[in-house]
Amino acid sequence: MRNQTLRLLLDGEYICEIAHRHAYEYLLSDGHNQFVNEWLDAINMRLARVGEAGAFFIAPLGLSSDDTTRIRDEFLRFRDVYGPAIRMLQVIRAAKDEFEMIPGAYIQHAELVQKVNDSPATGEQLRNLVSTIRQTDTRYSNAELMKKLLEHLRGDGYLVLVDEATEMYRTTGKLEQLTHVLRFLSENVDFSKGQKEQADAADSADDLFDKAQK
């Protein structure tokens, strides 16, 4: 489990009990946690968590000027970095009233498709993402587009497939990281001052963020 956990961390994965349960349990051990931190220290990295009890990930031991610049550039490219996930999660929320921006939420493909087929507005919202969702085409049915949307989010680490037969997914701890990004932007308005694209993308996430706060 040790080598697998280290590999996941080096690959940039967010390790939570939903996406990588065994690795997550491994890191909960103080002894294992200490070993991983000592191992990462050799490459100037450290073990970090989203919030106080969220997913594990690796971060630099300290922020160099290059790291600071990279992080700032990522925020300034908000629309490209986070925008697609936010827009897809907005479609899921529109198709599932009780959906919350928390790790562990269940999402079923057939349930979403039924709502999309019954709601022209939600269907249009989904179809507006044809150019955003990977490997899609305008000729696809609503069911095919929704499946591609879920698989896109799965590929980006926000979802895992927990039951292939029923096409049931669950949100992962990486979703909490996205929530933290939205919170940061909402609390640091000056950070995006003068950056129209970032401000527009952040505004489009307001409704989703309000849900995440509850």
Image (tube, helix red, strand yellow):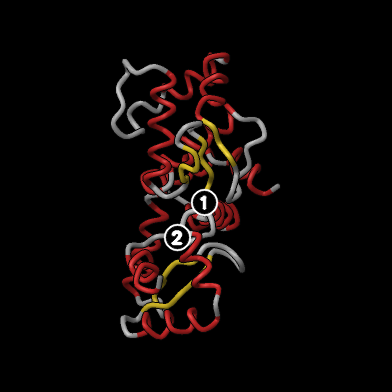
What mark, if any, has residue 14 been given in the picture? Answer: 2
| Element assignment for label 2 | loop
Q: Earlier in the sequence, mark 2 or mark 1?
A: 2
Q: Which residue is mark 1?
A: 172
| Element assignment for label 1 | loop
Q: Which residue shows up at 39% across the image and 74% down it?
A: 2
Residue 187 horizontal side relative to residue 166, left or right: right
Name above or below for residue 59 compared with residue 96: below
Is residue 174 visible in the rendered image? The answer is yes
Q: Where is residue 123 shown, x and y percent of the image?
A: 49, 18
Is residue 196 visible in the rendered image? The answer is no
- Tell me if mark 1 has few (under 14), some (14-19) or many (20+) residues whose alpha carbon lies within 10 angstroms of its own: many
Residue extending farthest front: 165
Q: Quadrant of the N terminus?
A: bottom left
> Of 74 and 141, which appears nearest the observer?
141
The amino acid on which the numbered mark 2 sits, given as a three-letter code, is Tyr
Q: Which residue shows up at 63% across the image and 47% down it?
A: 212
Q: Where is residue 71 shown, x and y percent of the image?
A: 39, 63
> Of 116 and 166, which appears nearest the observer?
166
Which quadrant holds residue 106? top right
Q: Where is residue 12 shown, x and y percent of the image?
A: 36, 62
- Tell me if mark 2 has few (under 14), some (14-19) or many (20+) residues whose alpha carbon lies within 10 angstroms of its own: many
Which quadrant holds residue 142? top left
Q: Which residue shows up at 45% across the image and 24% down it?
A: 126
Name above or below for residue 104 compared with residue 87: below
The amino acid on which the numbered mark 1 sits, given as a three-letter code, is Thr
Check contact, mark 2 vs mark 1: CB within 8 A: yes
**Numbered-mark total:** 2
